[in-house]
Amino acid sequence: MFIVLSKSFLIFDKDDVISSQDDSDCKKALIVYDLKRDSGKPTQIDWCPPTESTKNDADNVKKNPTVSFNTGTVSHLQEFIAISDELKNVIIFDHNFHQINQFKLKKNAQKMIFTKNETKILICDKAGDIYEFDVKQSSSSPVEENCGRLLLGHCSMLLDFLLTDDQRYIISADRDEKIRVTHYPNTRIVLVITNLFHPFN
């Protein structure tokens, strides 16, 4: 089940609450409750990522025609929302759910975090890399050219990462029991902790 919860929004996959057999509109969509306005009536946001897809994406659609949402996040000031799907598409909306940016990742997103000034979004993928993207799309840059800036990489799958409150460090943890502390935005490694759960090995 896909759920994104913040101070302002409750967001989930329409398919989690409405059977596709009972729904005449089979488009992929998000159901959004605005918790601040407390209207009680949800809003449906159609999911319209770019139509271009790789061969692997096409194969995944044939095996599983219902594409799932992967992960999502809301910015610190509740001004922006980012959602990704299993075909590596990311769409960023403003707080009124108008689309302001979209791009395609190289690997599926594991987690996404907005910076406090809400100009950048950091995305870690299942390959162990963390990329930085602009929140708002530059009018001079086509969507397909928005490949992000590689900040750092682990040798195994990332399980989690965070950006410290002062926005100076990224702390990331991988499947090989390594925790890395890295400067941000100039990503110089500060500290690597290994064998965290086996101190006597």
Image: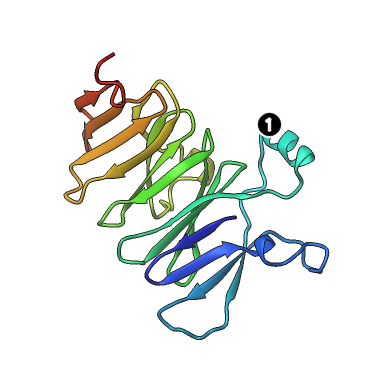
Residue 10 is situated, as x and y percent measured from the top left of the image, at 49, 68
Front residue of this view, candidates 157 and 82: 157
Element class at badge 1: helix
Q: Check the image and report above or below for 117 versus 128.
A: below
Residue 78 is situated, as x and y percent measured from the top left of the image, at 36, 67
> In the drawing, does residue 28 fall left or right of residue 23?
left
Label 1 crowd bin: few (<14), some (14–19), many (20+), radius 10 Å: few
Residue at coordinates 63% horizontally, 57% vertically from top-left? 48
Q: Where is residue 196, by image quadrant?
A: top left
**Residue marked by disc 1:** 56
Residue at coordinates 72% horizontally, 67% vertically from top-left? 18
Front residue of this view, candidates 85 and 35: 35
Q: Check disc 1 and give the amino acid type.
A: Asn
Label count reads 1
Residue 197 is situated, as x and y percent measured from the top left of the image, at 31, 26
Quadrant for the C terminus in the image: top left
Front residue of this view, candidates 166 and 92: 166
Residue at coordinates 79% horizontally, 68% vertically from top-left? 23
> In the drawing, does residue 151 fall left or right of residue 69?
left
Q: Check the image and report above or below for 49 versus 197.
A: below
Furthest-front residue in view?
200
Residue at coordinates 54% horizontally, 38% vertically from top-left? 108
Q: Check the image and report above or below for 48 versus 54.
A: below
Quadrant for the N terminus in the image: bottom right
